[in-house]
Amino acid sequence: MDQHERVVIRDSAPSTDGQTRRISRAQMLAWAGAGAAVTAFPGITDAQSILGRMDFPFYPQVPGTYTPEAIQDILNVLVTMERFAVAINASNLTAPKQPGINPVQLSSQQSAIVGNLARVDFLESLGAQSLTDTFTVGAIGTFGPLSLKRAELVVTIFVGTFMTAAREFAELGQPLLVKWAFQAGAVLAEERALARALQAVQNVPDAIPLDNKAFETDLFVYVRDAYTLMTKMGLFGGLPAHLPYPSRDEVVALAGPAGAQVLQKRPNNATVSIATPGDVTSERM
């Protein structure tokens, strides 16, 4: 039997359309190998029951009832968080710089504010409306270890929020929004690793390894839960320093040359696959 021949298997639970599910022999061999590999790692004890099924729960397994949030409500939270990021980055870049600041840290914040503004623009083009423009933080203009630790914390929340948004978009049957949420979350995950790298340079304990996760951590059942958490942290209307939201011209000026080098200011949709290595790192529209 070659890899193009078909074999029939039956799931432990019937498929929703009553049809017997069909897979290729190549898929079966791949799953068998994956099962052997998975069982070699502690903490994964039921590989057969996971890999032996071709369907997975669509909704989170939570107590009581669960209903995905409305798309508008999800977008509103996401744009609120991104506007917060624009405001805090602008305040840090406007404040007097500490002597000896790492130039990598400065340029990363300059490029980050452009990314935040780009995501604000995109989300607002979809109709997103910020839930608040009263953004607050304990101290501004600091680039030390404590500031970087807090940046890692906040950006981890951002990554978790976009992950939850992607799952809810999938549940709502919106695959294009799923991809766009992944594109944003993936860049934010890079920022998390960068925050850890800058901590390592300043000898912050536990900052090494920089890439300390095999999978990003799922944090929220609903996107609104991230907004609630950030409100409890005092980032929306709580702490002493109120952050003004900058104009577009101010963001461009603060970003400088580093901001001009930021690519992919809008998510793209591949209509054909790239065919050459040089296309991997170039911008795609």
Image (spheres, rainbow, N blue to C red):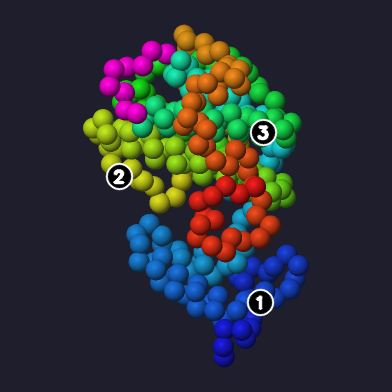
Tell me residue 58's x, y (percent). Answer: 64, 53
Helix, strand or loop: magenta stretch: loop
> In the image, 282: left or right of 140?
right
- 3 or 1: mark nearer the eye: 3
Left or right: 59 in relation to 89: right
The quadrant where residue 106 appears: top left
In the rendered image, the vertical position of residue 109 relative to residue 271, given as above or below: above
Is 145 left or right of 152, judged from the image as shown? left
Q: Which residue is mark 1?
A: 22
Magenta residues (range): 95-103
Query: Residue 149: x percent and y percent?
Result: 36, 29
Marks 3 and 2, Cα distance to the nearest angstrom? 33 Å
Amino acid type, callout 1: Arg
Indicate which disc, 2 or 1, sits on the residue closer to the N terminus.
Answer: 1
- In what quadrant of the picture does the N terminus appear? bottom right
Closer-to-camera residue (175/86): 86
- Measured from the top left, where is residue 216 in percent x and y? 46, 46
Q: Mark 3 vs mark 1: which is more N-terminal? A: 1
Residue 139 appears in the rendering = no
Instruction: Check disc 2: other Cα within 10 Å, few if <14, some if 14-19, many if 20+.
Output: few
Viewer-proximal residue among 6 and 99: 99
Write the residue at 23% across / 32% down: 203
Mark 3 sits on what residue? 123
**Is residue 76 rendered magenta in the image?**
no
Q: Which residue is mark 2?
A: 209
Q: Are marks 2 and 1 in contact (CB under 8 Å)?
A: no
